[in-house]
């Protein structure tokens, strides 16, 4: 897109990270990748060098290292892409031009429109993470900064373009230039990151607290007073009743949220998986009797560990919807289950063969707690498609 060189042009560009912060950020991400890789590689090497109980526990670090390395690598790629694809918006006379990169599709849109096409100029707030990476001596963390949403009509349809700012005075300069349109409005809508155009347009139009204003030299103070009026109206409950359409949308949203909460509940999604814990009592009973008869050694961990991992596979297959929380659920439930069997079925004498067998089961449950991720990563891809379709069907029913 061609750029204007007129001295009166207003140009707001997406800023790259400062060189010093970029070095710190990239060094941190590279360090996380290396640490994650070591957590994956080191236990595997130890497995061939020294197969011991300690090595067995180190195997539990593999999934954490893998997640750390993967997420850090993905974050590094994403931030590098953003640094090389910066959006910008220019105002020249009575025309707006912009080059907007979509971080999800990795596509760039170049467009322009005249002031006569503008329907509403919304002034609101958006959240910027790590503002100190872009503004010298700015506070760290998530900060609230100004944003202008330009709603305009083009090719017989309504569109919206957002211009986020890093500093208050830059936003004030834009509002001062746009004031002659007579279409300024405050909005309570807060945005975080990239928001799809259709979604943002809908949210802006449904904002019941939007309010027209005339520009003065104290824009920030005007906006603060506007937010105070909104808060007073909320406290006084001066709103009219919801329209039938708004009520239906609110109820549909509440049903969808309830369904999502139910879908994400590990206990509600166990289903037939509870049978595995019942089978564990049977296993504990028969292994105790087998040890008493001399058929198997009571003081061992290999056979109980194999049985526990087989039960883990069966549990992941039987649950209604497989969640990562089920790894913790199975590990904790198995330990408590075998601990209960050792107390109720084995008696109090730790020297008996049955009690030794039950203690081996409890100890093996602790050892296997660090390995429950292995069956998970094998079974999850097989169940992901079916679970996803089931969730979509449930949410669709909640809307009907």
Image: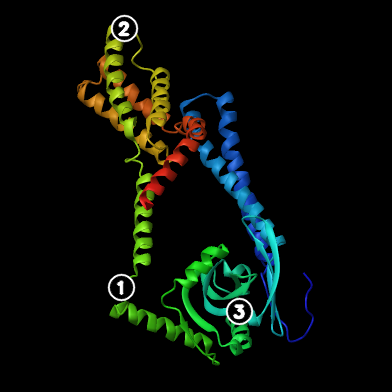
* In the rendered image, the vertical position of residue 289 relative to residue 24, given as above or below: above
Give the structural element (helix, strand or loop) at label 2. loop
In the rendered structure, the answer to whether residue 81 lies left or right of residue 381 reads: right
Mark 3 — residue?
A: 118
* In the rendered image, the vertical position of residue 48 relative to residue 195, given as above or below: above
User: In whole angstroms, how far apart are the C-alphas of marks 3 and 1?
Assistant: 31 Å
- In the depicted view, which residue is nearer to us: 346 or 4? 4
Mark 2 — residue?
A: 294
**Mark 3 or mark 1: which comes first in sequence?**
3
Q: Image point 39% across, 49% down: which residue?
A: 260
* In the rendered image, the vertical position of residue 272 relative to residue 140, given as above or below: above
Residue 361 x, y percent position in the rendering: 34, 23
Residue 116 x, y percent position in the rendering: 64, 82
Q: Tell me if mark 3 has few (under 14), some (14-19) or many (20+) residues whose alpha carbon lies within 10 angstroms of its own.
A: some
Residue 64 visible within the image = yes
Quadrant of res 280: top left
Give the structural element (helix, strand or loop) at label 3. strand
Residue 372 x, y percent position in the rendering: 44, 32
**Mark 1 or mark 2: which comes first in sequence?**
1
Q: Which mark is residue 19?
A: none
Q: Image point 59% across, 34% down: which residue?
A: 42
Farthest front residue in view = 156
Mark 1 — residue?
A: 241
**Proximity of marks 2 and 3: CB atoms separated by less than 8 Å:** no
Q: How is the image coloured?
A: rainbow
- In the depicted view, which residue is nearer to us: 252 or 258? 252
Q: Quadrant of the N terminus?
A: bottom right
Q: Image point 66% across, 69% down: which residue?
A: 14
**Proximity of marks 3 and 1: CB atoms separated by less than 8 Å:** no
Give the structural element (helix, strand or loop) at label 1. loop
Q: Tell me if mark 2 has few (under 14), some (14-19) or many (20+) residues whose alpha carbon lies within 10 angstroms of its own.
A: few
Q: Tell me if mark 1 has few (under 14), some (14-19) or many (20+) residues whose alpha carbon lies within 10 angstroms of its own.
A: few
């Amino acid at each position: 897109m061609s750029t204007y060189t007129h001295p009166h042009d207003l140009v707001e560009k997406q800023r790259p990270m400062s060189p010093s912060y970029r070095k710190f950020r990239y060094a941190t991400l590279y360090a996380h990748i290396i640490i994650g890789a070591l957590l994956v590689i080191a236990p595997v090497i130890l497995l061939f060098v020294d197969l011991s109980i300690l090595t067995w526990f180190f195997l539990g670090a593999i999934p954490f290292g893998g997640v750390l390395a993967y997420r850090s690598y993905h974050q590094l790629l994403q931030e590098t892409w953003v640094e090389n694809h910066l959006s910008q918006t220019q105002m020249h006379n009575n025309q707006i031009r912009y080059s907007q990169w979509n971080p999800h599709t990795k596509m760039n849109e170049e467009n322009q429109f005249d002031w006569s096409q503008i329907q509403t100029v919304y002034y609101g707030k958006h959240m910027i993470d790590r503002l100190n990476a872009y503004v010298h001596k700015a506070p760290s963390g998530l900060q609230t900064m100004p944003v202008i949403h330009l709603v305009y009509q083009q090719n017989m349809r309504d569109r919206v373009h957002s211009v986020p700012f890093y500093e208050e005075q830059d936003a004030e300069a834009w509002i001062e230039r746009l004031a002659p349109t007579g279409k300024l409005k405050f909005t309570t809508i807060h945005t975080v990151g990239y928001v799809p155009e259709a979604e943002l347009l809908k949210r802006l139009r449904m904002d019941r607290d939007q309010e027209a204003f005339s520009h003065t030299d104290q824009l920030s103070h005007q906006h603060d007073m506007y937010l105070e009026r909104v808060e007073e109206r909320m406290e006084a409950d001066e709103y009219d009743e919801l329209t039938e359409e708004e009520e239906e949308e609110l109820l549909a949203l509440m049903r969808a949220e309830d369904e999502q909460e139910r879908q994400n509940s590990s206990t509600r999604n166990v289903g037939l998986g509870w049978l595995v814990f019942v089978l564990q009592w049977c296993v504990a009973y028969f292994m105790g009797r087998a040890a008493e008869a001399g058929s198997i050694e009571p003081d061992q961990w290999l056979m109980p560990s194999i049985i526990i991992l087989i039960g883990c596979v069966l549990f992941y297959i039987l649950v209604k919807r497989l969640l990562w929380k089920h790894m913790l659920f199975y590990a904790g439930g198995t330990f408590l289950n075998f601990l209960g069997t050792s107390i109720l079925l084995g008696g109090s004498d730790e020297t008996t063969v049955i009690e030794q067998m039950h203690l081996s089961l409890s100890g093996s449950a602790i050892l296997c707690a660090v390995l429950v991720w292995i069956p998970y990563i094998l079974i999850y891809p097989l169940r992901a498609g079916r679970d996803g379709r089931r969730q979509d069907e449930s949410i669709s029913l909640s809307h009907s």
